[in-house]
Each structure stands twice: as C-alpha cells, then as structure tokens.
Amino acid sequence: MAVQLVHPREAPDPRAFRLLPAGGKYPPSDKPLFLAGYSELCRVDLNGQHALEICGGGGELAARLAQVFPQAAVTGLDFRVPAGPETEAWRKQSPNLSYVAGSAFDLNFLPASSVELVWGQAALHHLAHDPGTLCQQVGRVLKPGGRLVFIFEPLGHNLLVAAIRAMRMARAEMPDESNLFVSQIEGMSADFSKCEVQVFNFLGYPMKAFSDRFAPLNRAVQTLDGLLFQKLPRLLRYGANCNLIFTK
Ligand SMILES: C[S@@+](CC[C@H](N)C(=O)[O-])C[C@H]1O[C@@H](n2cnc3c(N)ncnc32)[C@H](O)[C@@H]1O
C-alpha cells in the first residue's frame, strides 16, 4: 500500500493545545509537528473508546488525553509504571486513566479489536528493529478503522539526521534506536489500509540551534519549509522529523 508523504497545512485541532505541555521537553521549534500529531490524537472522538499509549515514559501525554476525553479509557504502557506525586495527581483527576508495565511487542493482555487508537511519542525508533511483531500486535488489538499514530520520529533519508544519529549510535548513546526509512514504513503499511506520513524540518533541522532560541526565526524557517515541501514534493522524504498515521 502506498505511503502518502505530506506537509500538513491545516490549522491544529483546538484540543491539541491542551496536550502541548506533554511535548514540553522537546525542542520548541518542533511545536508545529507536535500540534499536527496531537491533532491526529483528537481527530476521532475517543469518548466511549479505549486508547493505548505505547512507550509512554512518564505518562503525561496519556494523562492529558484522558483529561481531553474524560469518557475514554486511556492506558499508558511502558516497561515501568510511572510513579510520583504528579502521576498520583493525574490519576486522581482522571479515573479513566491507567498505566500498565509491559512491552509494546506484547499486547496480549488486551482483547482483539478492542482499541480505537494506539499511539506513541518518540517511540517508533525504539521499536523499529522489529516492525513485523509491532504491527501484528497492534493490528490485532485495533478495531477496524482504528489508528496507530507515532509522533516525533526521525527520518533517516535526511543526511544530517543520519550522520548525527550514526555518530551517537557508534558511541552507544542510543542502544535500542534505529533510523526510519520510507521503505520500512511501506513494509509496515502492508498491515493497514492507509498510511500518511507528516513531514517537517528540511531547513528547520539545521536551523534548530538558532530557531529554538528565537521564535520569529523559527516561524520564518517553518514557512520556508512549507513552501519548499509544497513546490518540491520530492523533498518530503528528506525532511528530518515526522508523524506517522496508520489506519487499520
Ligand atoms: C524517548 S522515550 C519517550 C517517552 C515518552 N513517550 C515521551 O515522549 O516523553 C522512549 C520510551 O520508550 C520506552 N520503550 C522502549 N522500548 C519499549 C518497549 N518495547 N515497550 C515499551 N516501552 C518501550 C522506554 O522505556 C522510554 O520510556
């Protein structure tokens, strides 16, 4: 199935702004990417549905999604259940929020076709060494029409991303990480009916060091990237960062 590479141009879903603090530790220049990704989490009314975050880390994004959709059952999964006063406060505020310890490669604790949304933030590049198992596990639990969304992933066709990450991998700084390639995403998409990849940061990536500190520069670079991606769609695969939306 063909993978569609796009640079999103529509205004973010207003609810996406309520999720934005959960991307707060990432570069400020990536805000448009996070707003586009978070809009995808809000695209379908999740109230009455089950949503599962994989590789959820400290669990803030799951907590915020549970607040946005108070009638949804939201589960955050990572190797460890997050703990601490902040986690307790989120749980108290949202009885519809739960955390489980486990692996994204083993979702057998969930019934088949029971989940409307599975998502991960900065997650797929930790799982990309075994996309087959991942897609099989997620495909089993997703309802027909349900979606698998990944937010903030690196694209390995971008030479600067590839070089920087290769250097860090060689220094063993990223033991479980891989780069993503369109061919690999195409392989994953075979298990789904639709796959869209939202691409960001062509010039935005080398400019990050400056534009993270100076918002007007970031806006100018983002606008320029938007124009470049529109006029030269072949550049899309060379963007540095992406969100992926697979529909079952
Ligand atoms: C870069 S962190 C992202 C955490 C969080 N999503 C965020 O954006 O702050 C990657 C997370 O993936 C988790 N992880 C890696 N492999 C996993 C697996 N197979 N199953 C569950 N979690 C995994 C790690 O424990 C870590 O918390």
Image (spheres, rainbow, N blue to C red):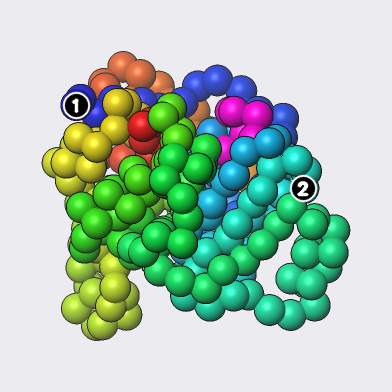
Q: What residue do we see at 70% from left, 35% from top?
A: 47
Q: What is the quadrant of residue 35 in the picture? A: top right
CA gap between label 1 and label 2 equals 35 Å
Q: Amino acid at mark 1?
A: Met
Residue 131: in magenta span? no
Badge 1 is on which residue?
1
Front residue of 171/132: it is 132
Q: What residue do we see at 28% from left, 78% from top?
A: 175
Q: Amino acid at mark 2?
A: Gln
Chief SS of the magenta region: loop
130 sits left or right of 74 in the view: left
Q: Earlier in the sequence, mark 1 or mark 2?
A: 1
Q: What residue do we see at 60% from left, 57% from top?
A: 75
Residue 42: in magenta span? yes
Q: Which mark is residue 67?
A: 2
* Position of residue 219 measured from the top left corner of the image (x, y, whole percent): 57, 35
* Mark 1 Cα-neighbour bin, 10 Å: few <14, some 14–19, many ≥20: few
Q: Is residue 174 above or below residue 205?
A: below
147 sits left or right of 100 in the view: left
Q: Quadrant of the N terminus?
A: top left
Q: Secondary structure at mark 1?
A: loop
* Position of residue 208 measured from the top left corner of the image (x, y, whole percent): 46, 53
Q: What is the quadrant of residue 18 in the picture? A: top right
Q: Which mark is residue 54?
A: none
Q: Residue furthest front?
A: 111
Tell me the magenta residue range. Answer: 41-46
* Position of residue 155 measured from the top left corner of the image (x, y, whole percent): 28, 48
